[in-house]
Structure formats: structure tokens, C-alpha cells
Amino acid sequence: MLIRTRELRKEYSLGAHRVQAIRGVSIGIDTGEFVAVMGPSGSGKSTFMNLLGCLDVPTSGDYELAGEPVEHRTPDELAAIRNRRVGFVFQGFNLLGRANALENVELPLIYAGVAAADRHRRARARLAQMGLTDREHHLPSQLSGGQQQRVAIARALVTDPVLLLADEPTGALDSRTSLEIMALFQELNRQGITVVLVTHERDIAQFARRIVSFRDGLIADDRANAAPGDAHRLLEESAA
Amino acid sequence: MNLWLTMRVALRALAANRLRSGLTMLGIIIGVGAVITMIAVGAGAQARVEDQIKGLGSNLIIIMSGSVTSGGARMGSGSSFTISEDDAQVLMREIPELISAPAVRGGVQVVAGNANWSTAMFGVTPEYPEVRQWGLLSGRGFDTNDMTGATKVAVLGQTVAKALFGDTDPLDQVIRIRKVPFTVVGVLERKGQSLFGQDQDDVVLVPLSSARKRVLGGLQAKQRAVNTIWVKVREGYDMKVAEGQIRDLLRQRHRLQPGQDDDFYLRNLSEVLQAQEASSRILTLLLAAVASVSLLVGGIGIMNIMLVSVTERTREIGLRMAVGARGNDILTQFLVEAVTLSLVGGFVGIVLGAGGSLAIGHFAGWRTELTTSSIVLATGFAAVVGVFFGYYPARKAARLSPIEALRYE
């Protein structure tokens, strides 16, 4: 089991109030799964995602990632886990505007302490995988939204993480580009990468093979998606 | 993340906001430039005083004829020739740490060919050049034969040599001092200005005996009296002790009763100069301190702009943290940016400061001295300013929570 949480809780203090963002979430996710996390805003899905990605620490409860307990870690240890284990894809791409595509993809490797030659080689390979070989030296501002998101995905994958966490990855994209990105995720998942995708769009969630719904800080629904959509086929159909 | 890469990221970030980086650096540039220039001005003043000390000769005491009291009226300095050649000899004999050189002085008109020049003539003993630490450029000084024989030989100061002979060699030429012919046997090195701004090279030296017998003649009331005795105290010997010994000995020789005023003046000139040197050193410090204030203001400018930069780049910081940057990586990145700003500013400031001190030297005619230590100091200070004022914003960036930073709009 790649991800295992037990009674995971997170409280925030908002002024005098204490807000329970998630109130005891226990879930297991296996290697190779494609999970969509759904829920209205305020349901706790983003908090859950932050905890999964080790961007935040739980108030209580256990979290094991790839067999390693993750709670009670120092910020530096969490940074190392994020660096090695987790790849992030964000709604707003979050690329460095002054760095070209190649440099953006290399960024996690820099913090991993990988030597320059190795860094270039691995970053190039991931960009090639995303079909962006000829865009290596373009700045983000010179790329389309879909291309930027593919650069971001290349960056997420460059350290060979066990988990790909995507937070509304299609939120800033038009429907066709969204389909392209989802096709990419499905392809990556077929190759064995575990994908956890946070979205509030049912259309997007239905490409996943498992859909977990959050409500009021708890899992309201967790079921397999018997017939996930095939983004690649939909793309071909719309092209035809 | 290695330093070279961090440097590149820092330079890129600074280059992205050229105008802002430039203006921020301007604070440091002006600060460092001001420090360098002010220290150069101060060091120049100090060096001038030091040169004067060297020119005067170290450990030098001057004994001058003092005031005598005649019928209740005190006559003032130099009103009478109270010190003598014999005083000088006794001083040298009784106190082995001293070398004394008595001198008589007279204003004279000197003629050579059809050139003439009004100058000061000093009648001196062979010890004079050693005591004054004043070497010969060419020719020879005086010896005991000159003293006993009252030979008509003269040694010229640079100004006199130039005035009388221009570029031709004055050696073995004959000059007339108050119509008495003297042969030039030597030329003194350049000595420069005295402490009081007089041209010390405007001088003719002749043997003491010759001055008295051949030139001054009956003007001298007492046969052995002199205007001045220059005393050089051996290196390492306490000047205060030497002064006391000289005073005691002279009072004894002059038969002065306790309570009676000295009839001579002792002046420890290097002491005067050392006081001047100390004051010029304080001036340097003061100038540097004032200039440092502008460096400090420049540092605050860096802090200000780094705080803005951290706020602007909060999302970038969040992203870097999300992909694995540790707090230290972020801290280093912003610190290197701040230090780069201050160091680049510092280097430009050094160039500007060097130019500024040259300009002051050129246009104001002040002596300025660009010292390595001031450059090292200013560079170090700039780096310290960068670290000091860059640390707070950098730490602020490093302590951001990754989620909040990523969410920052």
C-alpha cells in the first residue's frame, strides 16, 4: 500500500475560532491507482491533498507514505520527502517565469543535489516524454497553457516520484486542452504511476478509476469508477 | 543547491528588475564611494603630516634663544643670543644620547654671475645634515677642516641652486654671499615645506665659523652665540627624559636660579607633529564615520527592497519549497541576492570613490591617498551590510509555510 492514513485530523485556528478542516480521515491507496478526490470547497479535500503531499503536517493521526511514517517530521525532512517521493501539478502551473522550460523541469533535481549533466539529461528526457523537445528553451510566457501544464508535469515527474498529486490541473485550461492533460495522466497511470487528482469537476473526475468524495472534513463516498472515460479516445473522436 | 547556481539565480532575479536593483545599489555605491573618498582625503592629510615629520627628522628638539629679563622687562624670544656653540658641545659631551648641531642664521643676498637671490644663510657644524636627516644630492658636506679653517665653502638648498644656476651644475661654482666669494661644494636633497609652510630648500649652508668670521662679522654680539641648536635624540631614548636633561644642563650652565625663567626655549617639534597627526587621524575617522552613515542608509534600502522582493515572490518560494527546497536553500538564495546587490554596489562604489578622490586631489589640490586597507574595509563593510540587512528578509522567506506561500495571491 502506497498511502495509508489513520484518523487523520487537521485543525486551523482562524482568529479565535478553531476550524477542523478534516476530522478523521482513514484511507488506503495502492500503488498504480488513479484516484480523483472530489468535494465542494471547504470540504477538506485541499487540506487532505496538502497532507498527502507533505506540504502540511496533521494535527493528529498517522500517515504512511510508501511504508514510511510521515507525521512528526521536521520541515527539512518533509522537504526531502516532497523532493523524492511526490510530484506536484497545480492549477496555475506555478512555473518560474524567468526560467525556460528545461530549467523549470530541472528545479527539483537541483534541490536533490543532482549534478548538472545528469540534471540536463533527465529533464530533457521528461520534456521529450511530454512532447516538448523543441520547447526546451522557451520561457513559460512563450508557451500555451497546455504546454505550460505539460512542463509542470515533466517537472513533477523528473525525480521519479511514487506519487503524482494534481490539484485542479485542468482548472485553468479549455476543455480540449483539459482532455489532453487527462489523456496524459491516464497514460502515465497506465505506465504505473500513482495519480491522486483533486477536482470539483465531475467530468474530470470520471477519468479516474476511483472517486473519493469529501464532505465537511470527512470521506462521504469512496467507490471504484467501473467505467472510467478514455480521454485519448474522446480526443480522437472530437478531432474526427 | 550549490553556490554558483545560487549566484546565477540571484543575478537573474536582479537582472529582471534592473531599475530597481540599480537604484538599490546606488545607496551602496554612494556609501562605499563616500567612505573610500573620505578615507582617501583623511589619509592624504595624515600622509602629509607624516612626511613633515620625516622631513623634520625624527626625535628632534630645537633649542632657541629665549627671553631675558632686563630691569623687570621680559624681552621676548630671540631678543638676545643666550645659547652658544659651547652649550651645544657640552650637551653632546654630557648626554651621550644626543647629537647637537648649533646654527646661526642670517638673511643674505646671494649672487652668482648675473643671477641673484635673497635667502637664508645658516652657519652650521658638520653634524647638521645628520641631525636634520637631510642628505646631500651631490658634492660633500662640511668637515672639521672647514670649521677650523673657516673655509669659504657653501652647500646649496634646491631652491637656491635652481634660482642661481637653473639647470646647470652648481658644484665648484663661485657664489657671493654678501659679496664674500664662496665655492659651492654640495647640493642638498629636496626637503619640502616646513611645518609652518616655509620652503626649507630656500637655504645656503656654510660652516659656522665661516658664517661668523666672513659674513656676519660684527653683527654677532657674543662671539660664540648661536640662534638655534638642533638636537637629535637617539632612537628609542625617551624624549621627555632628554628634554629634562637638556633643560637642567642649560639652566646650570646659564647659572639660572630656581624660580627664574629659562632663557631659552625647548621645542619638541615631532611632538607637535604627532599631535597634528593624531588630529588628522581623528579627522579621517570622523569622515569615514559620516560616510558610513550613508552606507548604512544604503543597507536599509537593500533590506527594504528585499522585503518587497520576498513578498512579490511568495508563490515562487512556495513552489520551490513544494519541489523540495529546504528553508536553508531559500535563506541562502535571498541572502546571496542581497549580498550580490551590496557587493556589486560596493565594487562600483570603489571605482567611483577612487575616481572621486583623484578628482578631489586634482581640482581641490588636496593630497589624497587611496589605501588598500580602505578598499578592503569598504568591500568588507558592504558585504557585512548585505548579510546584515539581507538576513531578515531572507529568514522571513525561509520561514514561510509552503501551503500559504503557494496560495498567496
Image (cartoon, coloured by chain):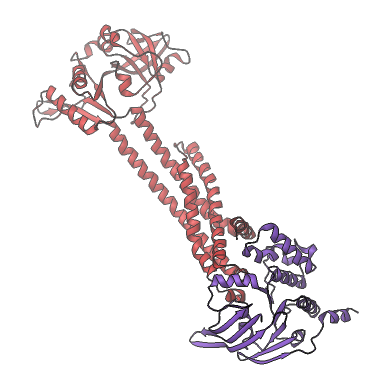
Q: Quadrant of residue B26?
A: bottom right
Which residue: 51% across, 66% down? Answer: B395
Which residue: 27% across, 27% down? Answer: B234
Image check: A167 left or right of B47? right
Q: Nearer the viewer, residue B178 or A87?
A: A87
Image check: B348 left or right of B128? right
Residue at the extreme right:
A240
Above or below residue B356? Residue A46 is: below
Chain represented in purple: A
Quadrant of the drawing holding the N terminus of chain A = bottom right
Task: Tell me where residue B209 appears, x and y as whole percent.
Answer: 26, 11
Above or below residue B402? Residue B60 is: above
Q: Nearer the viewer, residue B105 or A139?
A: A139
Q: Is residue B65 visible?
A: yes
Quadrant of the drawing holding the C terminus of chain A = bottom right
Task: Tell me where residue B76 appears, x and y as whole percent.
Answer: 19, 28
Image check: B139 left or right of A132? left
Residue at the extreme bottom:
A220
Q: Is residue B229 visible?
A: no
Task: Tell me where residue B41 appears, x and y as whole percent.
Answer: 44, 41
Task: Tell me where residue A122 appears, x and y as whole percent.
Answer: 72, 63
Total labels: the figure holds: 0
Image check: B265 left or right of A212? left
Which residue: 52% across, 70% down? Answer: B399
Q: Nearer the viewer, residue B382 or A70?
A: A70
Chain represented in red: B
